Image (cartoon, rainbow, N blue to C red):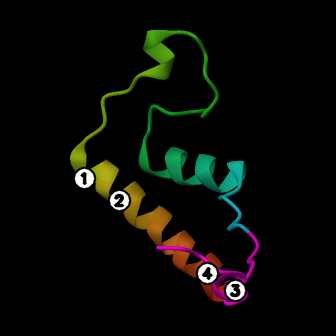
Amino acid sequence: MQITPGDLAMTTKTAPAKGPSEALLLEIATRHFDSIETLETQNSDRLDFHDVAVWANRSALEAAYAAGLAAAAKR
């Protein structure tokens, strides 16, 4: 299949979606995972790896999804 200049005229340029703010990610993490105080790498297994219950994971994912929906609605 060959692309012609007319084919390219049909495309539109859109701004890339902005990612979530660090503050929002930290808020979701600290609200749903008691042992997490920062999302920065601390170079310590004890501080960088956490045991997390599946229901806490699910709750955090639902919060992140809801935040994404809210952000999309504002666009």
Which badge, 2 or 4, is on the more N-terminal residue?
2
Separation of residues labelled 1 and 2 (CA atoms): 6 Å
**Amino acid type of the residue tagged 3 in the rendering:** Lys
Could you say whether the residue bearing mark 1 is in a helix, strand or loop? Answer: helix
Q: For the residues labelled 4 and 3, say whether their Cβ atoms are less than 8 Å apart.
A: yes
Distance CA(mark 2)–CA(mark 3): 23 Å
Element type at mark 3: helix
Q: Is residue 51 left or right of residue 43?
A: left
What residue do we see at 73% from left, 77% from top?
14
Q: Nearer the viewer, mark 1 or mark 4?
A: 4
Q: Which residue carries the number 2 mark?
A: 59
User: Disc 3 marks which residue?
Assistant: 74
Residue 55, numbered circle: 1
- When the figure is inspected, residue 6 is found, relative to residue 56, above or below; the finding is below
Which amino acid lies under the numbered mark 1 shown in the image of this protein? Trp
Q: What are the residue bounds of the magenta stretch?
A: 1-15
Residue 13, percent from left and from top? 75, 78
Q: Which residue is mark 4?
A: 72
Q: Nearer the viewer, mark 2 or mark 3?
A: 3
Q: Nearer the viewer, mark 2 or mark 4?
A: 4
Q: CA distance from mark 1 to mark 3?
A: 29 Å
Badge number at residue 70 = none
Mark 1 surroundings: few (<14), some (14-19) or many (≥20) residues within 10 A: few
Quadrant in which residue 68 is drawn = bottom right
Q: Earlier in the sequence, mark 1 or mark 4?
A: 1
Q: Nearer the viewer, residue 42 or 35?
A: 42
Outermost residue, top side: 44
